[in-house]
Image (cartoon, rainbow, N blue to C red):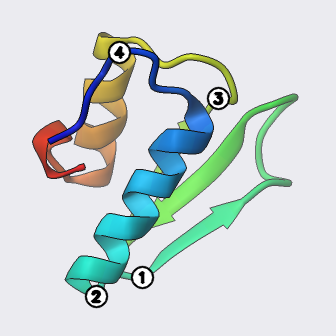
Amino acid sequence: MCDTNDLDGKEFIRKVRKLARKTGTPMQLDRFQGKGSHQTLFYGGQQTTVKSGEIGVGLLHAMCKQLGIRPGDL
């Protein structure tokens, strides 16, 4: 279960990477495809943009929806 308090971009990427290993889903992070401190995360056939700072609950749910995962899976 994902604790949404104090979740930042690095921790989100770490949790998605762990989930990808667990499920055998391909995951890739492109640090050069994004503006400023944003990165593009590819999970399976889906993608989302990850910012480096703190991620709020609404943004977390939107990013998980874009990747086709549930926040509770993280």
**Mark carried by residue 5:** 4
Q: Real-space Cα distance between discs 3 and 1?
A: 21 Å
| Element at label 1 | loop
Q: Nearer the viewer, mark 2 or mark 4?
A: 4
Q: Which mark sits nearer the N-terminus, 2 or 3?
A: 2
- The residue indicated by pointer 2 is 24
Q: In terms of secondary structure, where does tag 3 sit?
A: loop
Is 65 left, or right, of 44 in this rendering? left
In the visual, does 34 lie left or right of 14?
A: right
Amino acid type, mark 2: Gly
67 or 17, which lies in front? 17
Q: Which residue is mark 1?
A: 26
- Distance of mark 2 from mark 4, alpha carbons? 27 Å
Q: Give the mark, 4 or 3, whose residue is nearer the N terminus.
A: 4
Instruction: Choose the circle earlier in sequence order: 4 or 1.
Output: 4
Q: Amino acid at mark 4?
A: Asn
Disc 2 crowd rating (10 Å Cα; few below 14, some 14-19, many 20+) is few
Q: Secondary structure at mark 4?
A: loop
Question: What residue sits 37% from the left and 35% below the top?
Answer: 63
